[in-house]
Amino acid sequence: MIKIKQNTYKYVYGPVPSWRLGSSLGIDLLSQKSKICTFDCIYCQLGATKTYSNQRIAYVHVDDILRELRSLPPKIPIDFITFSGRGEPTLASNLGIAVKAVKALRPDPIAIITNSSTMDRASVQEDLSLADFVIAKLDAFSAETFEAVNKPSDMIHFENVVKGLLKFRKNYNGKFALQIMFTEENKKYAGKIASLSRKIAPDEIQINTPLRSCPVPPLSEIELMDIKNHFADLNVISVYEGNKTYVEPISDSDTLKRRGKV
Ligand code: SF4
């Protein structure tokens, strides 16, 4: 394993082990003290959303991201460079510019993890289409469950989220996964969420439950296996079966910061 000297990076974090992505080097295009998000999910490990954000804004200069990436060793054993971080990455208006710039700098495939709330916007679809792998959140099957689990801003409507997912799926050429976080709140709707997932027809379904410390407890492995049965005809993986690759972080403190722990 390559030993990476610990430094403080402001926008780049990891590599971190990810059950969905193997070893992932993260980029946070938001990098604000408080999270920037359209949602206030009941399981969010970053704490409550103080003020909802709906507008796309450039929070970070792409040149600053590139400067940090250039300071890394040229060969780090990673599977993906992932745009995620403290909030919803598609709220960064320079996401597409950043993806193109990172691709020009490094050969690693790019993943973006989104909460799907802005996918009905053409500019967001355009930016996401530049990634090799898009992982999109879908925790609900109806406006009521959406309100109960994701607590969206008034500007975000479930029907538009679903329309955005369907349209993006139709046009996107990369790998597309739906990630579903199950808790007590939505576990009884697994069958209905599976039906909606079938209509969206992703390449992969990722069934999750909050294993890291957060305001709600995780479901057990047995409960998640029961839920998985509803998705049996799809390409499905659950967090309990995921890859537990160990990777050495660039900076432990930065990784914890991105997880809302400092
Ligand atoms: S979408 Fe992610 S960052 Fe936003 S509230 Fe939900 S869990 Fe937190």
Image (cartoon, rainbow, N blue to C red):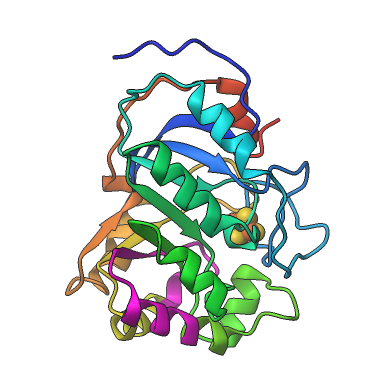
Residue at 28% over, 59% down: 225
Q: Position of residue 229 (x, y in %)?
A: 23, 69
> In terms of depth relative to the viewer, which is nearer, 162 or 181?
162
Please tell me whether residue 178 belongs to the stretch shown in magenta: yes
Q: Position of residue 83 (x, y in %)?
A: 50, 48
Is the residue 246 above or below the residue 97 in the image? above
Please tell me whether residue 29 belongs to the stretch shown in magenta: no
71 on left or right of 236? right
Q: How many marks?
A: 0
Work out which quarter of the rendered image holds the C terminus and state it. Answer: top right
Quadrant in the rendering for residue 108: top left
Quadrant in the rendering for residue 175: bottom left
43 on left or right of 33? left
> In terms of depth relative to the viewer, which is nearer, 155 or 217?
155
> Can residue 158 be seen in the rendering of this structure?
yes
Residue at 75% over, 65% down: 53
Quick one: which residue is furthest to the left in this view? 233
> In terms of depth relative to the viewer, which is nearer, 100 or 194?
100
Residue at 61% over, 58% down: 88
Q: Position of residue 27 (x, y in %)?
A: 54, 41
Q: Position of residue 160 (x, y in %)?
A: 56, 87
124 on left or right of 187? right
Work out which quarter of the rendered image holds the N terminus and state it. Answer: top left
Looking at the rendering, the stretch of residues picked out in magenta corresponds to 163-189
> In terms of depth relative to the viewer, which is nearer, 203 or 65?
65
Q: Quadrant of ligand 1?
A: bottom right
Quick one: which residue is furthest to the right in this view? 51
183 on left or right of 63? left
Residue at 41% over, 84% down: 167
> Can residue 138 be seen in the rendering of this structure?
no
Is the residue 69 above or below the residue 205 in the image? above
